[in-house]
Image: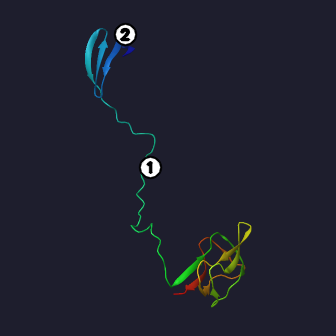
Amino acid sequence: MKQFKFTIRGNEYEVDVKRLESGSAKIEVNGTLYDVELQKEDRPSKTPILIRPPVPVKKDAHQIKKTEGGTFRVKAPLPGNILKIHVKEGDEVKKEDKLLLYEAMKMENTLLAEKEGRVKSIKVREGDVVLQDDLLLELELEQ
């Protein structure tokens, strides 16, 4: 199988590995056969093993919940500046009506109503700087 030459304390040894199995080997040293038990040396790995806890997922997390009536919260999609507010509290809005003009990433964006309803409250003013997911206004949905 493999041949090796060892020099131990000035003596030379020719070693032939005849058979190598999981826990033992048959070797020939200078013409004499030996059965040798192999011991595996446990060395810690230099590569760290990352162990992360499992992410908790609710059983119904994949389902979309339909809301009927109640309040719909309009949040900022990106950080930016409020340039103009097109509605005031108490106004009736239909789907796709303009709510406000918003500057984000050097572009002007018009936020449109996603649902029909009445403007319940406006949480920002023109000139305000908002962060992503900041509450801009609330719509009271029609039942």
Residue 82 lies in quadrant? bottom right
Q: Which residue is mark 1?
A: 50
Indicate how the structure is coloured in the image.
rainbow
Residue 135 x, y percent position in the rendering? 59, 78
Q: Earlier in the sequence, mark 2 or mark 1?
A: 2
The disc labelled 1 sits on which kind of residue?
Leu
Q: Which mark is residue 100?
A: none
* Element carrying mark 1: loop
110 vs 134, left or right, is right
The answer for how far apart the CA atoms under marks 2 and 1 are is 47 Å
Q: Which residue is mark 2?
A: 12
Residue 111 x, y percent position in the rendering? 66, 75
Residue positioned 55% across, 81% down in the render: 72
Residue positioned 31% across, 19% down in the render: 19
60 vs 122, left or right, is left
Q: Nearer the viewer, mark 2 or mark 1?
A: 1
121 vs 109, left or right, is left
Residue 9 lies in quadrant? top left
Residue 131 x, y percent position in the rendering? 63, 72
Residue 1 lies in quadrant? top left
* Element carrying mark 2: strand
Residue positioned 42% across, 51% down in the render: 51
- Picture layout, residue 84 above or below residue 5: below
72 or 117, nearer to the observer: 117
The disc labelled 2 sits on which kind of residue?
Glu
- Picture layout, residue 94 above or below residue 21: below
Number of numbered tags placed on the structure image? 2
Residue 48 x, y percent position in the rendering? 45, 45
Residue located farthest toward the top when viewing the structure as drawn: 31
72 or 18, nearer to the observer: 72
Mark 1 surroundings: few (<14), some (14-19) or many (≥20) residues within 10 A: few
